[in-house]
Image (spheres, helix red, strand yellow):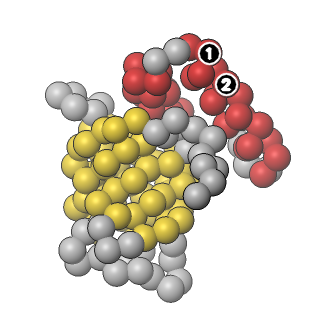
Amino acid sequence: MVERRHFSRILYQVPATLINANGEWRAEVRDLSLQGILLTKPESWSPQDTDDRYFISFCLHDSDIELRMETRLVHHDAAYLRMHIFHIDLESAGHLRRLVELNVGTDELLHRELEQLTDLHKHSGES
């Protein structure tokens, strides 16, 4: 299998809330990147034909700092939901960046990933 991932994923496990127009579910974050998030699939969740947009929120470990993001479902299987982050507020983005920075290992890798993220948003027309 060819690795297509452009962003480093970090293991991070914390409870999360998953919300869309059809309901609200409790899930667990399993890993994160600057552009995506992997969640455990809630038992009562089922794929929606009409709405693949979800709001996700979770608090950082031992903190009341909450990260909030808008995501799109990319893939699901029996155990996990893979989501693409398409909008994140500035404060949450700063916290996510710092979390990745602490776990990636090198500043050079982090800066390269931030440049890739900026380039992707420029080319996709998103801000």
Q: Amino acid at mark 1?
A: Glu
Q: Amino acid at mark 2?
A: Arg
Q: Is residue 101 left or right of residue 107?
A: left
Q: Nearer the viewer, residue 75 or 69?
A: 75
Q: Residue at x 17, y 28 (%)?
A: 62
Q: Residue at x 63, y 41 (%)?
A: 6
Q: Nearer the viewer, residue 78 or 68?
A: 78
Q: Nearer the viewer, residue 92 or 113?
A: 113
Rendered position, 79 above or below 31: below
Q: Residue furthest bottom?
A: 49
Q: Quadrant of residue 122?
A: top right
Q: Position of residue 18 (x, y in %)?
A: 33, 61
Q: Quadrant of residue 77?
A: bottom left
Q: Can residue 91 be seen from the camera position used here?
A: no
Q: Position of residue 79 (x, y in %)?
A: 30, 67
Circles 1 and 2, Cβ within 8 Å, touching? The answer is: yes
Q: Residue at x 31, y 48 (%)?
A: 30
Q: Which residue is mark 2?
A: 112
Q: Is residue 4 left or right of residue 60?
A: right
Q: Which residue is mark 1?
A: 108
Rendered position, 58 above or below 2: above
